[in-house]
Amino acid sequence: MTLISNHVSDATYNTAIQVLGEKLTAQVMMAAVAINSWNRIGIATRMMPA
């Protein structure tokens, strides 16, 4: 989901909705976006794990 050059297929998205429901799928997607953002900030600022 966080790779810009790739797309989540309709089948994968629909399976997620069937398994998790719309609300939880949206929450999982937002968590993935937040984690990816923090990882990119960490890489850009050369942060090291504590």
Image (tube, rainbow, N blue to C red):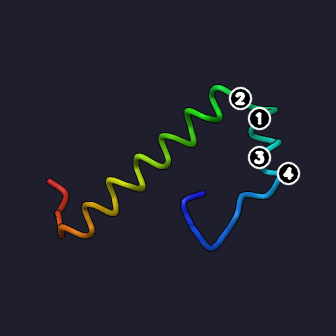
Q: Residue at x 47, y 41 (%)?
A: 31
Element type at marker 4?
helix
Residue 6 on image: x %, y %: 66, 69
Instruction: State the separation of the CA atoms marked 2 and 3.
Output: 10 Å
Amino acid at dot 4: Ala
Residue 3 on image: x %, y %: 57, 67
The answer to whether marks 2 and 1 mark residues whose Cβ atoms lie closer than 8 Å is yes
Q: Which mark is residue 13?
A: 3
The answer to whether marks 1 and 3 mark residues whose Cβ atoms lie closer than 8 Å is yes
Q: Which mark is residue 22?
A: 2
User: In this image, 48 relative to 9: left or right?
Assistant: left
Element type at marker 2?
helix
Residue 36 sits in which quadrant?
bottom left
Element type at marker 3?
helix
Count of marks overlaid on the render = 4
Instruction: Decide: is 27 above or below 49.
Output: above
Amino acid at dot 2: Glu
Disc on the earlier residue, 2 or 3: 3
Q: Residues within 10 Å of mark 4 (few under 14, many from 20)?
A: few
Disc on the earlier residue, 4 or 2: 4
Amino acid at dot 3: Tyr
Instruction: State the separation of the CA atoms marked 4 and 2.
Output: 15 Å
The answer to whether marks 4 and 2 mark residues whose Cβ atoms lie closer than 8 Å is no
